[in-house]
Amino acid sequence: MSGLNGLSHVALATGDMDATIRFWRDLLGCRLVGRLGRPGQRAYFFEWPRTLPVAEKEAGVPVAGPFALDHVALGVGSLDDLFALKDRCAAAGIAASDVTDHGFLYSVYLHDPNGITVECCCPARGVDLEAAPVAVEQDPTPVAREGTDPNPSVWPAPTSRGEWPVVPGTGYRAFAR
């Protein structure tokens, strides 16, 4: 109904583009599908030369003050894939948590070169989160109690018909048709 078909990309700020690419592309196996750039900024990952890594924190641990992202979770195919990831991290000298059994999924946690917590996870054997979402929260919010399926009726209906201007962006000249 929403037209969404998956995660397109995650834009991460980094002061070390090469270390970030090595981690995400070469260690985790994420394909580098696009690169854009303009003076002072490159993108697939954004490189801002004076950007410093954030302090590493454990996923889900609350913080006080301004905060934007707890962690990025990437799905893998199986528990064997998680063990293989742990092997790759150990060989690369990158700290990774033990495999954590959350009951409905297994997770490994690590940090990218920018201090961003990365969770790699797969469903527990016999669990299909698409077919049967899991809710283990003891005190869900009223909106969470409404269920797992989208409810677009809580938002106003669109009044336009998608007739919006399209303006040139960073990569326009390279791909202009």
Image (cartoon, rainbow, N blue to C red):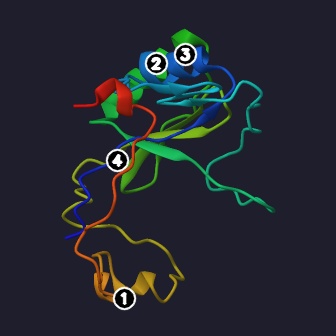
Residue 32: % across, % down: 38, 23
Q: Say if 100 sits above or below 115 in the image.
A: below
Tag 1 residue: 154
Q: Which of the image's four quarters has the N terminus?
A: bottom left
Would you name the residue on which mark 4 appears? 7
Distance, label 1 to label 4, CA atoms, is 23 Å
The residue mark sitting in front, 2 or 4, is: 4
Neighbor class of circle 2 (other Cα within 10 Å; few <14, some 14-19, many 20+) is some
Amino acid, disc 4: Leu
Image spot of residue 127 (x, y percent)? 25, 55
Judge from the rendering whether residue 166 lies leftward or rightward of residue 65; answer left or right.
Answer: left
In this figure, which residue is indicated by the disc labeled 2? 27
At label 3, the amino acid type is Ala
Element under label 4? loop
Q: CA distance from mark 2 to mark 4?
A: 20 Å
Instruction: Say which quarter of the image contains residue 65.
Output: bottom right
Name which residue lies at 36% across and 88% down: 154
Q: Indicate which disc residue 4 carries.
A: none
- Depth check, mark 1 against mark 2: the one in front is 1
- Crowd band around label 4 with a 10 angstrom C-alpha radius: few (<14), some (14–19), many (20+): few
| In-front residue for pair 142/106 | 142
Q: Position of residue 76 (x, y in %)?
A: 33, 36
For discs 1 and 3, the disc positioned in front in the rendered view: 1
